[in-house]
Image: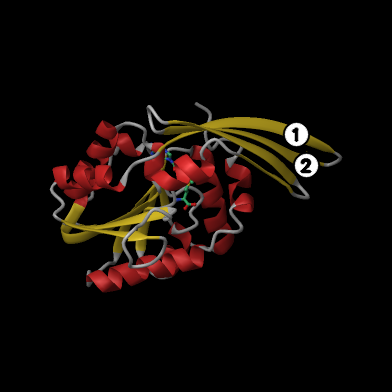
Amino acid sequence: MMQYKDFAFIYDNLMDNVDYDKWVDYIEEIIKKEDVQVKNILELACGTGNLTIPFAKKEYDILGIDISEDMLSVAREKCIDEGIEVVFLNQDMTELDFEVYNLDCVLCACDGFNYILEDENIQSIFDNVYELLKQKGVFIFDISSYNKLSNILGNNTFGENREDITYIWENYFDYETNMVEMDLAFFTRNKEYYQKFEETHYQRAYKNDEIVNMLKNTGFDYIKVYKDFTFLSPDEETERVFFVCKK
Ligand SMILES: C[S@@+](CC[C@H](N)C(=O)[O-])C[C@H]1O[C@@H](n2cnc3c(N)ncnc32)[C@H](O)[C@@H]1O
């Protein structure tokens, strides 16, 4: 499955409409609201470090893990440019090999868990996170909602024609498996020609209750669920669901 290979090098370009400052502020607000002392953070599926780097700049001791070496190479390059040091590890979070315990906070932002297609793998990540957290440590993550993946992205095609990048993004949602296949074709400008490359991504749509039940199975008994960068409960229209759990 080809995911986040060549795409890694244009990811930041295509995410330029995402307000990562707002994302960092929201996570800090959650931490404050939960009254947890957070100094160290483990970030799962950190990608090109769009949250990792701002948190590192704010003096958090943050370490990022991602399955894509190419995404991490972009993240490392950005750290060099900004003169900051962050440790990034190339790991599959379903086979987390990390033995630093008593963590204050574990994060996973922007669809990381939608890329985990099997319940048993989500469950084992939750179990590992629980083991790694300190008592009262906080686990914060978000997913694209069932509504977003099934109705909005669903069986739709998107595209954009930019100066240097053009893409076509075709989605197929399967209601039996609750999975969306995303066929992506990119054309990037290379002097006077455009180079084409393709990737297929699979994301799973989870209902909020499915996630909450798995968190409870792990042993989390303090679980909050919020909609779209607010402290309100999710509703039918919610596109991004945030989960906040304390050990
Ligand atoms: C949409 S990107 C989000 C990246 C970053 N969190 C952000 O907010 O920009 C999803 C990321 O999940 C990573 N990912 C997918 N499956 C993974 C797995 N099993 N283990 C670790 N990372 C994974 C991908 O490589 C990709 O970097």
Which residue is label 1 attached to? Answer: 195
Residue 218 image offset from top left, x and y in percent: 16, 44
Question: Residue at point 43% right, 38% down?
Answer: 67
Question: Residue at point 28% right, 34% down?
Answer: 119
Residue 72 image offset from top left, x and y in percent: 49, 45
Amino acid type assigned to the residue bearing label 2 in the image: Arg
Q: Report helix, strand or loop for mark 1.
A: strand
Which residue is label 2 attached to? Answer: 189
| Pointer 2 residue Cβ closer than 8 Å to ligand 1 | no
Quadrant in the rendering for residue 197: top right
Residue 85 in sight here:
no
Compared to residue 71, the image places residue 26 above or below, namely below
Left or right, residue 61 beside residue 77? left
Q: Quadrant of ligand 1?
A: top left
Q: Report helix, strand or loop for mark 2.
A: strand
Q: Name the N-terminal-most of marks 2 and 1.
A: 2
**Outermost residue toward the front in this view:** 236
**Outermost residue toward the right in this view:** 192
Identify the image's colour scheme: rainbow, by chain, secondary structure or one colour: secondary structure
Amino acid type assigned to the residue bearing label 1 in the image: Gln
